[in-house]
Image (cartoon, rainbow, N blue to C red):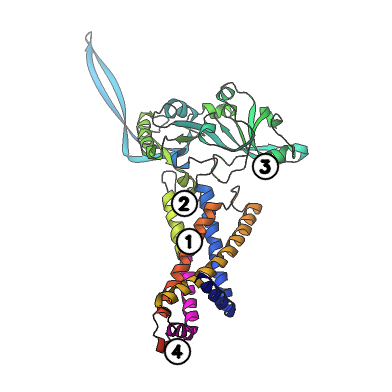
Amino acid sequence: MFKNYLKIALNSLRKNTLYTGITLFGISFTLMVLIFAVAVLENELGSNKPMTQSDKLLFLPSMTAHGYEREIETKYDSTWVEGMLKIDTIITTKVNRANKTNESNAGLSYTVFNRKIKTMTTPKRASVYFPRVPINVYPANAKLELIANLVDAEFWNILDFKFLEGKSFSEITVANRVREVVIKQEAAQAYFGKQESYVGREFVWGTKGTFKVVGVIDKTASSNEAVIADLFFPITFANENELDYDYGHLGSCHVILLAANSGDLDKISAELDKVERTLQPVNNLDDFFFNEKSVKDMYAWSFIGTQRERFGNKLLMYIFIGLGFFMLIPLINLINLNSTRVLERSGEIGVRKAFGAQTKDVLVQFLFENLILTLIGGIIGIFLSQILLGVFNTNKWLGETNLSMNLKVALIGFTIMVIFSFLSGIIPAYRISRIAIANALKTSSL
């Protein structure tokens, strides 16, 4: 039976070359776009190295500080001392939180991390880093622009980078300001030239001096600020004013918190609320708020949202709604094309039913034909997707994000297309399978 279905399907597709071509284009193009969208989401938000624990991560990329109107009250207190009237002036300042006069947004100070965040009990691990430090070097007298992150030792315990050789630097390295650096392979090739090994080689960072390469890591798929850098230095090599800077508890540090499990993220947020209330007013800033963000929120922050708002889930909702509308148009077109195709074959269906074919046989036949067409279009779509992803990676149209199509991405895209095939074929197939034999033999009308 399957063999007969396959023969009928292939013969039908060969006879209707125009319909087949239009349908294949619609299916392959739709699948290409879907796979591209899924690849972006999977690479950016999926549990991939170095963020395999993405569902347990909470970022603190900034703080918001509010300053309020101050009301100064002066009171006088008089007393008699040794027969003389003595007047004391008492000046008090009241904060009127109904009238906000100042708002500041910045990273956390290094002091706040060490005294407040690092001592929290709910997170399993806590790491601090300075992101996106620009570095200009001149290997072979040619300017090379790189980006560095200055990180602590705990950074490597939270984010599991793929080390191609060597290892990360340790807590002792950070504390003693040992000159070591971890570098991405692509940056190492650009700086040193293509070598069999880069571990042990020396990287010169301007006035900071010479650093020994102790580890080489693979490129990352995500554009998250914590992992996108080319080089990773110990955080203690940050400028002194960055380590000491503490204007109203604000600074330049970003923080990553790792929960023991994803269910503990709310507990971490609750403890952060308590920490906020322990921060004393300073520099006319009275209240302080940690701007917590998940991996999804960090990605959404590049497009929508504010310091305080978390738009990760909303961005995903927008994307899925957009993809739904994108699929709806070709779905309607394919239903119309399928209806026209089965209309032309009503005579064939009438003959088949006259010779004993049952309604379910006709229904299965048309759904099978649609599935075969979808499979062919899917293969073309996957091939086109590989080309599209390669073009985006080569031209870096998405920045440093390196898109790839793994088995999970392909299966998700292909599953969507099978559902797409069923929906576009079930209505026309059902209508033609219900046609009366006499009507089918007399006319092509449904």
List x then y, in percent, for residue 255.
48, 35
Provide the residue designation for mark 4.
Answer: 441
Please identify the quadrant where the C terminus is shown: bottom left
Q: Residues within 10 Å of mark 2 (few under 14, many from 20)?
A: some
Q: Which residues are magenta?
A: 326-355
Q: Is residue 261 left or right of residue 43?
A: left
* Mark 1 residue element: helix
List x then y, in percent, for residue 125.
46, 31
Mark pair 1, 3: CA separation: 35 Å
Q: Quadrant for residue 169, please give it.
A: top right
Mark pair 2, 4: CA separation: 60 Å
Q: Amino acid at mark 1?
A: Ile
Give the main secondary structure, helix, strand or loop, of the magenta stretch.
helix
Q: Which mark is residue 186?
A: 3
Q: Quadrant for residue 278, please give it.
A: top left
Q: Which mark is residue 304?
A: 2
List x then y, in percent, for residue 191.
72, 38
Q: Which mark is residue 416?
A: 1
Mark pair 3, 2: CA separation: 31 Å
Q: In this orientation, which residue lies closer to the viewer: 22 or 37?
A: 22
